[in-house]
Image (cartoon, helix red, strand yellow):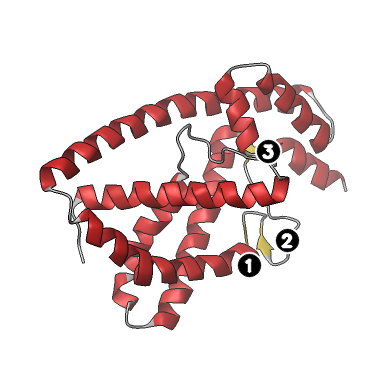
Amino acid sequence: MIYSIQIYFMLYIIYSVCGWILEVTCKFFQYKRFINRGFLLGPYCPIYGTGAIVMTLLLQKYIDDPVTLFIMAMLICSILEYATSYFMEKIFKARWWDYSTYRFNINGRVCLETTIPFGIFGFIIMYVTNPFILKYLYLIPSVALNILTIVIALLFIIDNIISFKVMFGVRGVTKEFNQNIKDNTEEITTRVKEILKNQSFLSKRLIGAFPGFESVKSKIKEKKSR
C-alpha cells in the first residue's frame, strides 16, 4: 500500500522516537543512569525511523508469508546498520558503536545478537504497530496533519543542521589526535572525551550519548600491532 508523504514522514518520526526510547531504556539498564542516545538533540534515533520506513515499503509483499518477512526484516536492517556504521565512520572519522567483542559479528558493525531482534521488530511493525499507528494518523484531518508535518519537519531540519555541525567538530578533534598521538585506543578516547567535555554543551551531550565512542584510526593501528 502506498501512503502519502505526510503519513510516511509521521511514521518515520514516530518510529525514531520509539527507537530513542528503546535505546535510552537499554542503556539505563547497562549503565544505571540516563543517557540521551542518538547524535541529534531531539528525542529520536533516525536509524529506527529509516528502518521502519524501508520495511514498510519493502515487506508489504511478504505480509502473507511470515517466515520470509522475518528473514527479509533481518537482512534489511542489518544492511542498514552496517551501511550507517560505515558511512558515519568515513565521514566523521569515528566509530559510534562496535560489536567486535560479540560472537558472529561482521567487522564489528553488525552481529547476530542484534540481527535476530531486527526480524522480531519487522514482525511487530508490519503486524502490530503499523496498523495501530495508521489507524489514528488517518483520523487526523488533512489540514491539521499537513501543519503538524511541516512544523515537525522544520524542527527536525534545524536539529540536523546543529547536530551535524557538532559532529564535524568531533571529527576535527579525532583527526587531530589521529595525526599527533601514537597511543592506545583507551587513552586517546579518554583524551578526546576530555577535550569535548570542555567545549560546548552539545559536544558534551554527544559524548554522553555514545559511552563507547572511540577514535577509529587509532583502533585500527592498535589491532595491526598485535
Seen from the viewer's position, the closer of residues 119 and 82 is: 119
Q: Which of marks 2 and 3 is nearer the N terminus?
A: 2
* Label pair 2/1, CB-CB below 8 angstroms: yes
Residue in view at x 67 percent, y 27 percent: 174
Mark 3 residue crowding within 10 angstroms, few (<14) / some (14–19) / many (20+):
some
Q: Position of residue 47 (x, y in %)?
A: 46, 49
Image quadrant where residue 65 sits: bottom left
What's the mark number on residue 102? 2
Is residue 8 depicted above or below 153 in this figure? below
Side (left or right) of 77 relative to 174: left
Which corner quadrant holds the N terminus? bottom left
| Sequence-first disc among 1 and 3 | 1
Q: Percent x, y for residue 119?
A: 49, 70
> What amino acid type is highlighted by mark number 1?
Leu
Whether 20 is drawn above or below 64: the answer is above
Which amino acid, mark 2?
Tyr
